Image (tube, helix red, strand yellow):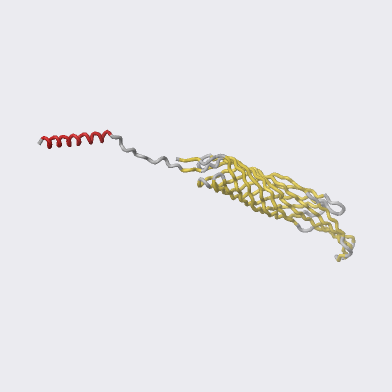
């Protein structure tokens, strides 16, 4: 009987002590996940790059020929372009980027203008002298450069749409020639061999103007970005004088040079690492 009573007391004591000791144990730790980190591309920093493409240029020409009526024509200067650029971007906030860019491009743009011939006739009785002048010019846009501001909008972190504008400058080479021909006629019928003289020259002009355009740029990987852009360039009007000799008249030629450029580019950005948004 005593043994049964002792066993009962012992079990009761264990039942009381067990829960008390369990209550003194530390609670199981609760682990929570860290904050969500979303990487955001930062466009801020200096960059260098290369670019190339194709351009359709035009020179609207007018020719003042001493002693003859003026004539007009145009030179289509189409060809490839290639060069490099450097710039700086500053990301003002999550959606906007402002910056500056300068570029320099060599070109293979060239063309020829052959405006209509102009003539005069001087007669003494039935004998007349018909003088004809043919003006021609070969033109090249040897190189051009721009210094522009850029304003970009970020529809996504890795894509920028931008507008751009600023100053432009370039070098135009003109190679004009004038062919002067005198033909004698008798009652309107040519006789004798025509007498021909030719004058030619070369003029190189560096001229400044303006440019405006736009495009898009997107991240390839890390600091590497690619771009596609269009630029309209207006280099203004250059004027050259070809002084004739003998029967060849002096010609003053004026050319208003414009260019339409489409090009792609590759940039490497320095600084402005990828930041994190929580």
Q: Residue furthest left?
A: 1
| Residue 159 image point, x, y percent | 53, 47
Q: Residue at x 23, y 34 (%)?
A: 20
User: Which residue is more in the foreground, 130 or 263?
Assistant: 263
| Residue 157 image point, x, y percent | 51, 45
| Residue 32 image point, x, y percent | 37, 40
Q: Taking 136 as reference, is 168 above or below it?
A: above
Q: Is 165 left or right of 249, judged from the image as shown?
A: left
Quadrant placement of the C terminus: top left
Q: Is 105 left or right of 35, judged from the image as shown?
A: right
Q: Residue at x 57, y 43 (%)?
A: 151
| Residue 49 image point, x, y percent | 62, 45
User: Which residue is more in the foreground, 278 or 123?
Assistant: 278
User: Which residue is more in the foreground, 40 or 74?
Assistant: 40
User: Which residue is more in the foreground, 110 or 6?
Assistant: 6
Q: Can you tell which quarter of the image residue 7 is in? A: top left
Q: Taking 113 as reference, is 42 above or below it?
A: above
Quadrant placement of the N terminus: top left
| Count of numbered circles in the view | 0
């Amino acid at each position: 009987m005593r043994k049964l009573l002792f066993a009962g007391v012992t079990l009761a004591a264990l039942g009381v002590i067990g829960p008390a000791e369990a209550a003194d144990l530390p609670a199981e730790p609760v682990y929570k996940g860290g904050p969500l980190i979303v990487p955001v591309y930062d466009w801020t920093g200096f960059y260098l790059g290369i670019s190339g493409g194709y351009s359709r240029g035009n020179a609207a020409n007018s020719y003042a020929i001493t002693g003859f009526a003026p004539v007009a024509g145009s030179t289509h200067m189409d060809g490839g372009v290639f060069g490099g650029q450097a710039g700086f971007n500053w990301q003002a906030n999550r959606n906007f980027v402002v910056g500056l860019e300068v570029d320099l491009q060599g070109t293979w743009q060239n063309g020829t203008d052959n405006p209509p011939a102009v003539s005069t006739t001087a007669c003494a009785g039935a004998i007349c002298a018909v003088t004809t002048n043919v003006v021609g010019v070969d033109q090249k846009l040897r190189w051009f450069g721009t210094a522009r501001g850029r304003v970009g909008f970020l529809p996504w972190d890795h894509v920028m749409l931008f507008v751009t504008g600023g100053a432009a400058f370039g070098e135009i080479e003109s190679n004009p020639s004038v062919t002067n021909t005198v033909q004698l006629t008798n009652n309107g019928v040519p006789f004798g061999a025509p007498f021909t003289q030719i004058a030619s020259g070369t003029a190189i002009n560096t001229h400044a103007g303006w440019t405006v355009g736009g495009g898009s740029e997107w991240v390839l990987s890390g600091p590497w970005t690619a771009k596609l852009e269009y630029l309209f360039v207006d280099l203004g009007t250059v004027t050259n004088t070809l002084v004739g000799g003998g029967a060849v008249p002096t010609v003053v030629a004026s050319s208003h040079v414009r260019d339409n450029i489409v090009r792609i580019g590759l940039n490497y950005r320095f600084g402005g690492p990828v930041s994190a948004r929580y």
